[in-house]
Image (cartoon, grey):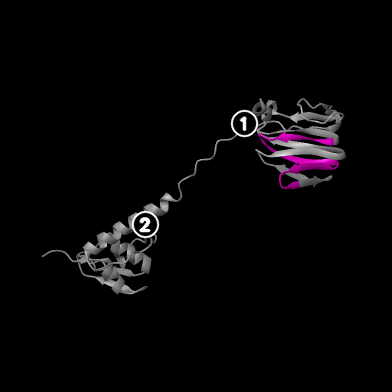
C-alpha cells in the first residue's frame, strides 16, 4: 500500500491558522509545506513507532510567501503546476531588479567666461552693410573651445543690410534698438529682449540709430556654410 500524500489543497482545507493532523507515514509535498507556512497552518505529524509524542515531531519550515496562482484542481499534479507558475512570477519580478548600466561620462570641458570689456570688435567681414554704416563683431566662444555653438558681440550704427541664415541664431539685445526685418513684418528688440531667427531665414539687420547685442549661433562653425 502506497504512502498518503498531503497536497497544498489539503493544507488550504484546514483554513488559515488551522491545524492539520497527518496520518502516520504521510508524505507532505514541498508546496504543501510552503502553503502551510503562508497560511500559518500547523502540521501535526503522527508519532513514530519509537513512541515520540506528536509535539516532538519536527516543525514544518516556514517558507517566504510568493504570489499565489489559482489552482484549478487538487492533488500533486496541481501542486506541480502552481509551483511552476510561482517560479515564473519570481523570475519576472527578479528581472526588474537587474542593475541598469550607467551612461558613459562625457569629457570635462572648462567654463568659458567672456567679458565685453575684453572683446575688441572688428569690422564686419562680409558685404551687405550700407555705405557709412558701421557694423562690427567679436567672436568670444567658438568651436576651438570645444563648444557645439558659438557666441559673440555685434554692434550696428544707423541703417540696415540683408542677410540669409544658414544656421540657427539667438540674439539678446544689450543696448539700443535692433530691428529684424522678415517677410511677414519687422521684429523690434530692445535691451533685455531675445530674438530667435531659424535656419534658412532671409532677413535684414537694422537699427534707427544704434544697437548692440549678443548672438548665439548653432552650429559653432556657421561660417563654413557661407562659403
50 and 171: which is toward the camera = 171
Which SS type dominates the magenta stretch?
Answer: strand
Q: Position of residue 66 (x, y in %)?
A: 38, 60
Vertical comparison of 15 with 202: above or below: below
Q: Position of residue 1 (x, y in %)?
A: 10, 65
Q: Quick one: label 2, few (<14), some, or many (20+) residues within 10 Å?
A: some
Left or right: residue 112 compared with residue 18: right
For residue 158, say whether it is visible.
yes
C-alpha span from label 2 to label 1: 42 Å
Name the residue at 13% across, 64% down: 2
* SS at badge 1: loop
**Residue 215 numbered tag:** none
Q: Which residues are magenta?
A: 159-185
Which residue position is annotated with label 1?
A: 107
Q: Quick one: label 1, few (<14), some, or many (20+) residues within 10 Å?
A: few
Name the residue at 79% across, 32% down: 114
* SS at badge 2: helix
Vertical comparison of 146 with 174: above or below: above
Q: Position of residue 197 (x, y in %)?
A: 70, 41
210 and 60: which is toward the camera = 210
**Quarter of the rendering containing residue 201:** top right
Left or right: residue 209 compared with residue 140: right
Left or right: residue 66 compared with residue 218: left
Amino acid at each position: 500500500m502506497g504512502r498518503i500524500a498531503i497536497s497544498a489543497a489539503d493544507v488550504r482545507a484546514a483554513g488559515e491558522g488551522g491545524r492539520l493532523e497527518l496520518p502516520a507515514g504521510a508524505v507532505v509535498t514541498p508546496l504543501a509545506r510552503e502553503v502551510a507556512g503562508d497560511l500559518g497552518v500547523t502540521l501535526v505529524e503522527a508519532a513514530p513507532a519509537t513512541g515520540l509524542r506528536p509535539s516532538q515531531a519536527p516543525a514544518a519550515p516556514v517558507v517566504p510567501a510568493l504570489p499565489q496562482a489559482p489552482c484549478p484542481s487538487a492533488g500533486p499534479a496541481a501542486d506541480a503546476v502552481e509551483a511552476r507558475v510561482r517560479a515564473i512570477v519570481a523570475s519576472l519580478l527578479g528581472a526588474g531588479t537587474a542593475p541598469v548600466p550607467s551612461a558613459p561620462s562625457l569629457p570635462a570641458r572648462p567654463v568659458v567666461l567672456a567679458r565685453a570689456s575684453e572683446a575688441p570688435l572688428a569690422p564686419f567681414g562680409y558685404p551687405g552693410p550700407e555705405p557709412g554704416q558701421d557694423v562690427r563683431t567679436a567672436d568670444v566662444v567658438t568651436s576651438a573651445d570645444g563648444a557645439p555653438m558659438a557666441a559673440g558681440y555685434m554692434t550696428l550704427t544707423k541703417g540696415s543690410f540683408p542677410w540669409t541664415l544658414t544656421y540657427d541664431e539667438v540674439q539678446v539685445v544689450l543696448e539700443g534698438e535692433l530691428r529684424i526685418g522678415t517677410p511677414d513684418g519687422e521684429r523690434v528688440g530692445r535691451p533685455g529682449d531675445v530674438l530667435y531667427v531659424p535656419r534658412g531665414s532671409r532677413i535684414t539687420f537694422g537699427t534707427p540709430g544704434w544697437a548692440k547685442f549678443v548672438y548665439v549661433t548653432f552650429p559653432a562653425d556657421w561660417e563654413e556654410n557661407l562659403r
